[in-house]
Image (tube, rainbow, N blue to C red):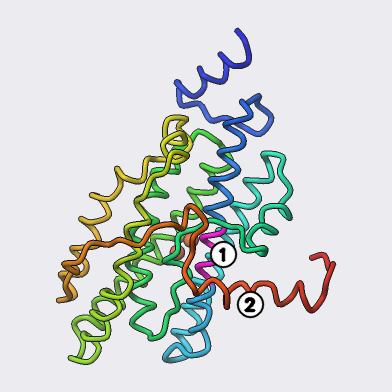
Amino acid sequence: MTQEERFEQRIAQETAIEPQDWMPDAYRKTLIRQIGQHAHSEIVGMLPEGNWITRAPTLRRKAILLAKVQDEAGHGLYLYSAAETLGCAREDIYQKMLDGRMKYSSIFNYPTLSWADIGVIGWLVDGAAIVNQVALCRTSYGPYARAMVKICKEESFHLRFSRGWLERLGNGTDVSGQKMQQAIDKLWRFTAELFDADEIDIALSEEGIAVDPRTLRAAWEAEVFAGINEATLNVPQEQAYRTGGKKGLHTEHLGPMLAEMQYLQRVLPGQQW
Ligand SMILES: [Fe+2]
Ligand SMILES: [Fe+2]
């Protein structure tokens, strides 16, 4: 049996591919791209939430938010480690992010201007993360699948955190309900991108590396719409429409975030950590 045949057989039998196994170059390349994009989304997602650590109401809530943001840093690091097992340097991947050449979902860099935005962004994004990442626990590449198992456990806590705020503020006062509805209406347009599939996503799903995101929308809607309704809020009538993150076309909010991420490198050029 040739190495190509052995590889195809393992994929067909759903036996994990491990770092020491032979794999086609195209598989390795698309996997690095997928894991890198995923890792960047985790890291970028820390920034809008991180801004609220000092402003969260009460010390206990600051500590909870801090733990959530640290979880996202951990998710990014597990994923960079999984990408390293494919032979690429961690520096290469995150240098792309620091240079602004990264691709990730743009909803993660939308500024969170009120505490309502924290609850809503979590509810929309963590809901999508769960449906996507539960499916990724069965991905064909072993280190990626194992990272996803750990990430999913933490992500389900994040979803409970967001659900708590969705219900508490949605069913709270008139003002808190209005703020939540405004946050949903504002962030809604970015949700289309979470279920966008380009030709690389389709190739990835054929290889068993990732799931075709278009197939996940119905499960996400069932969970997310139910939560919004229970919080006596409304799902916007308008179609979600903003896409482009997977092509590296991000919003105007990328600039200030890059400045924050590049700060350390600019102050201490050439430093290692
Ligand atoms: Fe995460
Ligand atoms: Fe999360």
In the rendered image of this protein, does residue 86 appear above or below residue 26? Answer: below
- State the extent of the magenta-drawn residues as a range: 40-46
Q: Residue 159, image x and y in percent?
A: 36, 65
The verdict on residue 78 being magenta is: no
Q: Circle 1 — which element?
A: helix
Task: Give the farthest residue toward the top.
Answer: 1
- Asked whether mark 2 lies closer than 8 Å to ligand 1, one says no
Q: Circle 2 — which element?
A: helix
The amino acid on which the numbered mark 2 sits, given as a three-letter code, is Glu
Magenta segment's dominant SS is helix
Quadrant location of the N terminus in the rendered image:
top right
Q: Residue 154, image x and y in percent?
A: 46, 61
Question: On the picture, is 124 further left or further right than 92?
Answer: left
The residue lying at 67 percent from left, 58 percent from top is 94
- Of tags 2 and 1, which is closer to the observer? 2
Tell me which label, 2 or 1, sits earlier in the chain. 1
Question: On the picture, is 198 further left or further right than 183?
Answer: right
Q: Which mark is residue 64?
A: none
Badge 1 density bin: few <14, some 14–19, many ≥20, Cα 10 Å: many
The amino acid on which the numbered mark 1 sits, given as a three-letter code, is Ile
Task: Using the image as rendered, state which of residue 247 and residue 258 is in the foreground.
Answer: 247
The residue lying at 58 percent from left, 62 percent from top is 74
The verdict on residue 43 being magenta is: yes
Q: Which residue is under mark 1?
A: 43
The residue lying at 49 percent from left, 53 percent from top is 247
The residue lying at 84 percent from left, 67 percent from top is 270
Q: Which residue is under mark 2?
A: 260
In the rendered image of this protein, does residue 120 appear above or below residue 96? Answer: below
Q: Residue 144, image x and y in percent?
A: 55, 43
Q: Residue 96, image x and y in percent?
A: 66, 57
